[in-house]
Amino acid sequence: MIGKNQQAQVTIVQDQANPQISALTTQVLSQIIEGFGKGIGMQKLGSILVQKTQVSSPNHPALSPAAFITPVIVALQGIIPGNPNYFEFVAPGIIAMIVMTAVLTGLAASVSREKERGTLDGILIAPVSRLAIILGKAFAQTIRGLVQGVIVLLLAIFLFGVTVHGSILLIAVIVLLGVFSFVGLGILVSAVASEQETATQLLFMFQFPMLFLSGVFFPIQQMPKAMQYISYALPLTYAVQALRKVMILGAGLLEVRNELIILLVFGAITLVVAVPLFKRIITK
Amino acid sequence: MENIIEVKKLTKKYKDVTAVDDISFDVKNKEIFGILGPNGAGKTTTLEMIEGLRPITSGDIKVDGLNVKKETKKVKEIIGVQLQATAFFDYLNLSELLKTFGDFYHRNINPDEILEEVQLENKKKSYARQLSGGQKQRLSVAAALVNDPKVLFLDEPTTGLDPQARHNIWDLVKMIHKKGKTIILTTHYMEEAEYLCDRIAIMNNAKIIALDTPLNLIKQYGKTSTIEFTTSHKVPIADIEAFKSVTKVEKVDHTYILHSSDVEKTLHSLVEYDEAHGVHFLNLQVKQSTLEDVFLNLTGRTLRE
């Protein structure tokens, strides 16, 4: 068909069941075909130019066919070295999610389990303040969450090839603040739901939507506007954002300052509300 | 201090139930004080209010001069409570358990010493779930002693134990008492109350209906004794109930147990019946009044269900 001076057509049949794979494949195929097409175009143009210039201006330097066909070339340059993959995008979110979940469910479960089991009695009989009890539990769950977070981080680095570009210390700070923001919520839930069953069910109800709305698996910008507003009300969103900035982009304290402040404020408010409520439920 | 515990007009009301109804009593320093009564009388609730575990509806409680409602923490420092459900942490052995409980009081205790006192030293590396019923009770007494309390609270310390374990606990209680500690215990076993206690408060239906030494209580309220026997022939129960001065008739297997307010008169009825109907009364026993009789006389019920 090219010989007949018409455009040749190559059809790519897409498997729509696997959108991500087919999109990538299509992209690559298109590039190859386009490149092939450009190659042919340059050949043809090259021969025409050579013929024409040889006739009209023999002393003019040779014209470049590439400058006609692709006058502007796009060069890509990344902010960070290397090639980030989807794991790198998802890993910070998953770490944040695991740590938050540990604190949320762990706290509620810990309180109701001790009540049901009866071990809380031994503590209540002693001169231990109820504030000490709840702080102790929150602390224990925080450490548990952190350990889980570290394990996930290590797995991400060594098994999934995720590279951490920011400071580990800053990551730890973000995670701690994320936990802090969630402890209040955890206390609130365990104060409201006295039986362990109810508490765990309530928490599940919250966690799943939160996972999807916080931008853990895909960017918030891809969501409908209404959902985006909900995302911005969730502390997990900010923790994930901050973690991503540090882990993938190597951001420093200054860049994540806003997210950290939001986490701090959220945590402080929920704690102030939750702790007095909680003192009521630690009884025999 | 003469009275180490002072309870004044103590009441505990729930939505539709009054668990403790306006009771008042004092516990003398270094005595063993018992609260005797059937299940549901209000004994445990009373104890829990003194321990600071349960909120008081109305009334005042002072322990060693401290107001329980206002200075709860200070009260908890000087008391030891035996936990009824004895729920201990699953993954700590006995030694670690006692050390942990000691930490709650900011005390660095030597667990071996306390375990020795309750004769559980050889089990110091075991876990609570591996202990027998009697050993568990001894453990909970040990846990109550970690802070060397002035007052020890024992809630039904021998319920569910076999006789030997029960006697072990009784010996333990007496030994602790010798050290100069005040002990207040609840029970629905009259032998326990009689054996251990210097003074007893009898509780029924949220009220205290009598308070005195076991001896005085029996003298004052134990007007009945029990007469036990078996019969050579079947006797209609109505006839037995008709015997003089019989307040109550019980039958366990083939043995009749009569509660009588005048033993002589009842025995006289037995003899008359024998002569009239030729029925012999065998294995005859006359038992002295016990606190069981005291309770029966005061309430018309038995301590046992």
Image: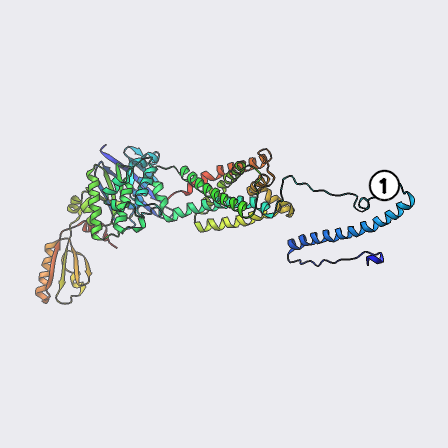
Quadrant the N terminus of chain A occupies: bottom right
Q: Chain of mark 1?
A: A
x, y (%) of residue B238?
18, 63
Quadrant the C terminus of chain A occupies: top left
Left or right of A108, for residue B104:
left
Left or right of B15, for residue B166:
left
Q: Assess disc 1: are there few (<14), some (14-19) or many (≥20) residues with their C-alpha within 10 Å of its C-alpha.
A: few
Q: Is residue B235 visible?
A: yes
Which amino acid type is marked by label 1? Pro
Left or right of A237, for residue B97:
left
- Residue in the foreground of this view, choosing between A259 and B190: A259
x, y (%) of residue B252?
19, 61
Q: Which residue is mark 1?
A: A61
Q: Is residue B120 visible?
A: no
Residue at screen point 13% across, 64% down = B231
Left or right of B139, for residue A202:
right
The single residue placed furthest to the right in the displayed view is A56
